[in-house]
Image: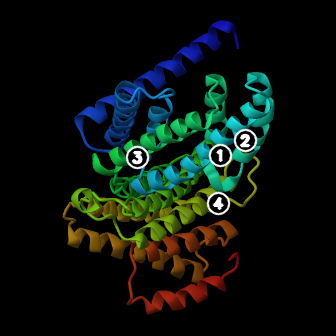
């Protein structure tokens, strides 16, 4: 690749990043969502730092007033509970850093370099203690402030601790009382995205299986399926943020909004993502000139595409329902019935050896059955349950 091509690639990446930042900024201004929540928290942190400086630096004339806005800025966290927990941790770490740096200054008679040699190795090592989390770094940075400022008398140490305490109170207070963060939309939006991308992946696979598809197509399906599993992990994290938002949050009842979907939906769609990954992995194994698995018959794949398309419809119906749109109950029922009918026909074909039995064909049907049980449960399917046992007895079953 030439230098010009590399520069063009860097330019394209920078342009893409700039466009993404501009889209996020527009979304933050135009509508509620994660972008606006991020903007709100950023402005709150800036406001808390300004207020802390106004109180300590402008009004109280504190000698090292920057500790107050620095502490306030760090304590406007994503949840009120996290602000409180971080505040306690940070005050403890800052106190340790202040006292140890003052002791180092006293031991060296005020020598800045000597005090750093004594204080910093201990405090940096102390900051790696895992229970301190991100707050561990503040001990060493506080020591740097104290040592470079040069005052280490008891009176000066008291001022440092007071400045940090003021900053902590302002940071936690602003986060708790000014639009306290409540993470509810994240669960809803990630679940919607998981449903939508599952439907889109299944639709893409169904269209391709009816025609010619390549190893590159199969690899792309597998990659998209793995991203669905990553999205399911992000959904679990969002659920944790939502639970944490309710803790120690005085604005929870004022800003809670609509309740997120039940946690059972997270588990269900996580299983859906796992089954889709298994289907995509099996198809990828049959693709290319050096396929690792036996390719199913074209007649099987053509019929299987119809089943995949019906499952995609089930995913799309679930997304519309979560969005609050009133689904067409009759059409949803027909889609479910068509999907199960296609599956039952596959079972009958295997029983009568209408397809050449292969491990891949059996694996695809097993995963499809699991998807149907997740997306279109039917308590009256006693026959299908018995048929499942017949399927396992067919040649080529895994």
Tell me which residue sits at (58%, 17%) in the image.
Answer: 10
Mark 4 and mark 2 lie on one chain; the one further toward the N terminus is: 2
- State the residue position of label 2: 123
Helix, strand or loop under label 3: helix
Q: CA distance from mark 2 to mark 3?
A: 24 Å
Tell me what residue is drawn at x 79 percent, y 37 percent.
Answer: 121
Disc 4 + disc 2, Cβ < 8 Å: no
Classed neighbour count for the residue bearing mark 4: other residues with Cα under 10 Å, few (<14), some (14–19), many (≥20): many
SS under mark 2:
helix
Q: Quadrant of residue 18?
A: top left
Q: Nearer the viewer, residue 354 or 277?
A: 277
Where is 128 relative to 187, above or below?
above
Label 4 sits on residue: 282
Mark 4 element type:
helix
- From mark 3 to mark 1, how far is it between C-alphas? 19 Å
* Residue annotated with mark 1: 96
Residue 169: image tag = 3
The residues bearing labels 4 and 3 have C-alpha atoms spaced at a distance of 57 Å
Identity of the residue drawn at 74% across and 52% down: 291
- The mark nearer the N terminus, 3 or 1, is 1
Residue 145 percent coordinates (x, y): 61, 28
On-image quarter of the C terminus? bottom right
């Amino acid at each position: 690749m030439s230098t010009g091509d590399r520069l063009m690639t860097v330019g394209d990446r920078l342009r893409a990043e700039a466009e993404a930042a501009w889209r996020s900024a527009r979304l933050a201004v135009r509508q509620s969502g994660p972008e606006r929540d991020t903007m709100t928290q950023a402005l709150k942190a800036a406001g808390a730092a300004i207020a802390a400086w106004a109180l300590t630096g402008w009004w109280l004339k504190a000698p090292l007033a920057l500790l107050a806005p620095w502490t306030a800025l760090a304590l406007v966290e994503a949840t009120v509970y996290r602000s409180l927990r971080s505040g306690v941790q940070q005050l403890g770490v800052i106190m340790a850093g202040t006292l140890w740096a003052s002791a180092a200054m006293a031991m060296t008679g005020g020598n800045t370099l000597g005090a750093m040699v004594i204080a910093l190795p201990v405090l940096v090592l102390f900051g790696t203690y895992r229970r301190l989390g991100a707050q561990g770094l503040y001990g060493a940075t506080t020591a740097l402030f104290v040592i470079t400022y040069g005052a280490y008398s008891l009176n000066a140490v008291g001022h440092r601790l007071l400045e940090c305490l003021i900053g902590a109170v302002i940071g936690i207070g602003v986060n708790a009382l000014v639009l306290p963060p409540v993470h509810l939309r994240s669960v809803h939006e990630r679940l919607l995205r998981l449903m939508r991308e599952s439907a889109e992946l299944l639709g893409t696979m169904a269209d391709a299986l009816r025609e010619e598809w390549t190893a590159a197509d199969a690899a792309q399906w597998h990659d998209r399926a793995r991203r669905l599993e990553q999205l399911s992990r992000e959904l679990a994290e969002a659920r944790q943020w939502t639970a944490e938002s309710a803790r120690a949050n005085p604005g929870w009842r004022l800003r809670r909004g609509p309740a997120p979907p039940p946690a059972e939906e997270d588990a269900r769609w996580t299983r859906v993502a796992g089954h889709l990954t298994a289907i995509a992995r099996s198809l990828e194994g049959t693709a290319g000139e050096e396929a690792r698995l036996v390719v199913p018959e074209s007649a099987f794949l053509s019929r299987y595409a119809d089943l995949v398309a019906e499952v995609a419809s089930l995913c799309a119906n679930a997304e519309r329902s979560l969005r609050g749109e009133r689904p067409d109950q009759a059409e949803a029922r027909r889609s479910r019935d068509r999907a199960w009918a296609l599956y039952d026909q596959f079972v009958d074909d295997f029983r009568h050896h209408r397809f050449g039995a292969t491990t891949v064909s059996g694996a695809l049907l097993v995963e499809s059955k699991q998807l149907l049980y997740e997306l279109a449960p039917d308590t009256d399917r006693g026959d299908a349950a018995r048929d499942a046992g017949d399927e396992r007895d067919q040649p080529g079953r895994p």
